[in-house]
Amino acid sequence: MKRIVLAFIAIAMLPLAACSNDKGREQFETAQFEEKQNNRDHAIQLYEEIVRKYPDSPTAAKAKERLSALKGSK
């Protein structure tokens, strides 16, 4: 019975494992993909949104770097 309960708890916790303290990470990955597809304007839009929504996250710092690079090379 204990195994069943533990298995149930482990399964119930799986969606939480996907959550990260690094907010905006998935959106950052999408922005990187957009860059690789030469969709520069959309990548910029996504990076700007990350900075706006999650200004103190590690991802925002990376997004600022990418924005600087993209806007500097226009």
Image (cartoon, rainbow, N blue to C red):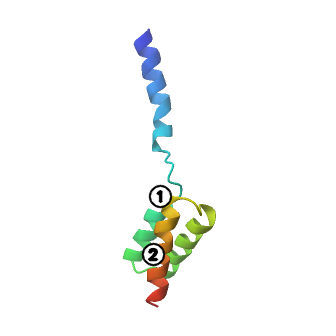
Q: Furthest residue to the top?
A: 1
Q: Residue at x 43, y 15 (%)?
A: 4
User: Does 31 appear above or below 25?
Assistant: below
Mark 2 near mark 1, Cβ–Cβ under 8 Å? no
| Camera-side mark, 2 or 1 | 2
Rendering quarter of residue 30 = bottom left
In three-dimensional space, the C-alpha distance between marks 2 and 1, rounded to whole angstroms, equals 15 Å
Counting from the top left corner in percent of width and height, residue 11 is at: 45, 29
Tell me the SS state at disc 1: helix
As drawn, the label of residue 40 is none
Counting from the top left corner in percent of width and height, residue 43 is at: 49, 75
Q: Residue at x 57, y 73 (%)?
A: 48
Residue type at mark 1?
A: Glu
Residue type at mark 2?
A: Arg
Which badge, 2 or 1, comes first in the chain's sequence?
1
User: Does 29 appear above or below 5?
Assistant: below
Crowding near the residue tagged with mark 2, few <14, some 14–19, many ≥20 C-alpha atoms within 10 Å = many
Circle 1 is placed at which residue position? 26
Give the position of the N terminus as an image quadrant: top left
Q: Residue at x 49, y 70 (%)?
A: 63
Circle 2 is placed at which residue position? 66
Rendering quarter of residue 57 = bottom right
Q: Furthest residue to the left?
A: 36
Crowding near the residue tagged with mark 1, few <14, some 14–19, many ≥20 C-alpha atoms within 10 Å = few
Tell me the SS state at disc 2: helix
User: Does 71 appear above or below 20?
Assistant: below
Counting from the top left corner in percent of width and height, residue 74 is at: 46, 91
Counting from the top left corner in percent of width and height, residue 23 is at: 53, 55
Q: Nearer the viewer, residue 25 or 8?
A: 25
Q: Nearer the viewer, residue 4 or 28?
A: 28
Q: Residue at x 50, y 67 (%)?
A: 61
